[in-house]
Image (spheres, rainbow, N blue to C red):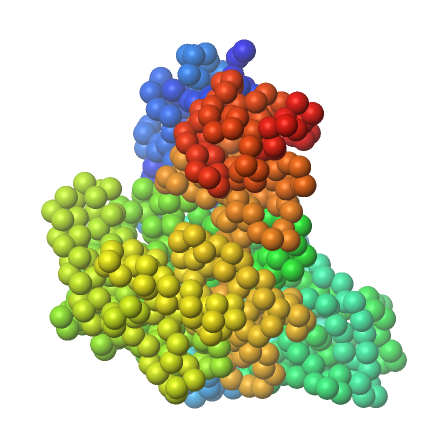
Amino acid sequence: MTPSAPSALKCESLQNPPGVDVPKPRFSWILESPERGEIQTACRILVSSETDLCRREIGDQWDSGWLETDRTFHVAYDGEPLLSCRRYWWKVKWWNAKGEESPWSEPAFFETGFLERSDWKTVWIGMRIPHEFRSKENVLLGEASGEHVQAYAIYLRKEFEVREPVLRASAFICGLGYAELFVNGKKVGDTVLDPAWTDYHRNALYSTYDITDLLKDRTAVGIILGNGRHIRNYGHDVPKAACRIEIEYKSGAQEIVQTDGGWKTSHGPILENGIYYGERYDARLEAAGWSEPGFDDSSWEKVSFLQGPPLSSQMLPPIRICETVNPVKVASPKPGVYVFDFGQNFTGWVRLSIRGQRGTEVRLRYAELLNEDGTLNTLPNENADSEDVYILKGGDIETYEPRFTYHGFRYVELTGIPGEPRIDTLQGRFVHSDVPRTGSFRSSNDLINRIHQNVLWGQLSNLMSIPTDCPQRDERQGWLADAHLSAEEAILNFDMAAFYTKFLDDIRFAQKEDGSLPDAVPAYLPRLYPADPAWGSAYAILVWLMYLYYGDTRVLERHYLPLKRYIEFLGRNAEDHIIRKLGKYGDWCPPGSITPKKTPVELTSTWYYCHDVNLVAAMAGLLSRHNDEKALRTLAAEIQEAFNRTFLEEDQYASIRVSKVDSYPNQTSNVLPLYLNMVPPEKKTAVLGALVRSIQKYTDHHVDTGILGTRYLLDVLAENGRADDAYKIATRESYPGWGYMVREGATTLWERWEKLAGPGMNSHNHIMFGSVDAWFYKYIGGIALLEPGWKKIKIAPILFKGLTSAETSVMTVRGEVRVLWSSEAKRFSLEARIPVGVTAEVRLPLLWEKACVLESGRIIWENGSPKTTVEGVASVGHSSRDVSFHVMSGTYAFVVCECKDAASTVPHKA
Ligand code: BGC
């Protein structure tokens, strides 16, 4: 049978990003085949400058020829040099194991951005002295520089003639802090809060839009600029924009319109606008038609020229309004005060629809919690005012949603409206980086499903072009520990490749000459150098996860040397391999405390030092830097020895003993060395025993860990034959634990294990305890990766009491892995989908003494030994508890039952 054509073609990331600005972009595709054990043995890629050439099989840019490779992703372009701002067409075909050739895929296209800096000599414009306002300083992070000084939103406009029929027109724009582009009165694209945050002292990102259909003979372009993080307190001047429009006429002629002295500027209806502050919009100041041709801009001033950072293309998924959330209830705790409950904590804002008299001032305040009397509890917002104000122009129904702010909330208070609101007066808008969903998980246990949902809402709420810690208070920074502790979960749920590629560059840019990193990236807060090693570890961990889960070797090459410099920095700060100085937060937020009351911070710092050295050693090996690898492996062994010498006491690792009562073994201190296999072999049983004793006897199957220990606790238990203990911890409904949060009404994860309602470190939408969801995928769903890029996987769900089924899928770089299992009285069945080019180790539980295994209705294993062979499956061994098979790509339906029931067993419908 002829293999089918490759599908889901992508260039650089799952969503084809506009404006690819890497000279050798990488191509990926997915292969589907009904055959088992299928593999690509060769492929051929064509890249053409015209769609027609591509269809006629003329790869004038690149014809790879017959490429003997099983690689179906990240095949790097190797043709003629690509030109800036062009569209290229490409397609691919493949040969299977039998040497049969597939048809060509449907052609796909990608567009380039500016491949050389000199291709766009940016001109930055803005308003020299905008009207300014002051919002509160950020007390939580102790920004000593006083109040935040910010500008009213700035409006820019220009008109030009479009001389001939247009073939294609693209707009490239970067506006700092935030920009929205309009052409002939219409907003371009559906992105919000654009561009992504970066350190503007180093770089900024431009977005690319196709505006072909928006042009008219006489065209007007408008830009609105908001403050975002481009504010004085972070060392910046006023908001500014660089924009370039490239028009390709049908005649072949080209025209470029860009920001220059011919633009004009003014203020408009958006006055105050700040991330924490909120927005103040006076609809009476709207200037109808300001971004349309013919508008009278005689009262607008000429723009000023400003300096701006170097630009590169924004290749991560942009921020969008991804979902509308309707309120579930409106209450009126006081006359004239209406509180909308959206039933869900999330990030974004509301859309207001209202009619009233001109000049009426309507206020929207946002909060995560309510007070007992039903009014808003804004204490956890700390110094973030989180208030949007809309002043009506009067007349018809007016709708408003803010542009340059966002809030973290479940409740919204509406005041100042004439009469009573309806439930649809407000609609919630869930706003976040629009990362594609790639994973799904569902089990027969409602509590676990709810925890999974809480993780999803929490994760998305904290993807705001960087991974943030929280969305509600005056913080919202890219804290590195929060990022790496939740990264595996994020990767299983979403396509994070482009997002982390960009964030890794942010980390690289944040590195200082001495190799140090800050705790939060971009480094908006200079006092956060040098990082606590547990925070700085995000650099090595994210690079490594990009390699493991996306098979990305380019990130290894790009970040290896900076990572080595970081390791050297840690080394210079170690005494006899123990890091005593750099630790600040350690095992942050354990039960009952913010600071690690039990786990020595030197222990966590040194452990992360060892962890990172191991990872960088493995990277050195992959990059064939063998001398480095050898030196780093030696160093890792020395750190390990020093770690054990310093922190291993008899049969358990060190703890800070606060009182007699908590003198039981410390969970985090013991989990970390077990995770890295650092425990001397003769002590391993004792250390594991101490950990299990702590869990079973002293904390009654509750976490006693902060964010660091929690990340590794459940994995360590599962990998050491203690999955039942892990499961009990994960599903505990009493304090502290994820189930407790659910029982107390949480719809996202909290920052603290405690239910707190006061000010301070008390966000109800943090993701740093989110790793539990990766555990669900791996041990309940049963999908785990064994080799980088999903080349080899393990399918081994663990059966827990009270859990009867789970359905899990992950869209990997090689296609979808799906596992559906269910456990009934007389049978255990498991259906698996394994993508082309992937092999799996499938482990099935033996629940009966005389058990049989069937695959698609045929007995393949019976009573301790293999039986009939079926295509794609080879038995590899068994224990008294389970049996394992080596399985090639394809779809399978396994059933385990008692041998006596085998004849009557039919497979589930796949
Ligand atoms: C953030 C955390 C972060 C921590 C470090 C907090 O304010 O919200 O999530 O990792 O600071 O101290």
Foreground pick, 821 / 302? 821
Question: In the figure, 767 relative to 890: above or below?
Answer: below
Question: In the figure, 622 relative to 304: above or below?
Answer: above
Q: Is there any visible trace of residue 433 in the rendered image?
A: yes
Foreground pick, 899 / 273? 899
Q: Residue at x 85, y 71 (%)?
A: 422
Give coordinates of residue 155: x percent, y percent.
57, 67
Q: Is residue 811 left or right of residue 309?
A: right
Question: In the figure, 710 relative to 169: above or below?
Answer: below
- The quarter of the picture where residue 285 lies is bottom right
Q: Residue at x 34, y 50 (%)?
A: 544
Q: Is there any visible trace of residue 121 in the rendered image?
A: no
Q: Quadrant of the N terminus?
A: top right
In the rendered image, the residue lying farthest to the right is 419
- The quarter of the picture where residue 342 lies is bottom right
Q: Quadrant of the C terminus?
A: top right
Question: In the figure, 675 relative to 533: above or below?
Answer: above
Q: Residue at x 23, y 77 (%)?
A: 581
Give coordinates of residue 814: x percent, y percent.
47, 34
Give coordinates of residue 613: x percent, y percent.
23, 57
Q: Residue at x 35, y 83 (%)?
A: 657
Foreground pick, 297 / 24? 24
Q: Is residue 551 left or right of residue 703?
A: left
Q: Is residue 885 left or right of residue 818?
A: left
Give coordinates of residue 688: x percent, y percent.
36, 61
Foreground pick, 143 / 164? 143
Give the tally of numbered discs.
Answer: 0
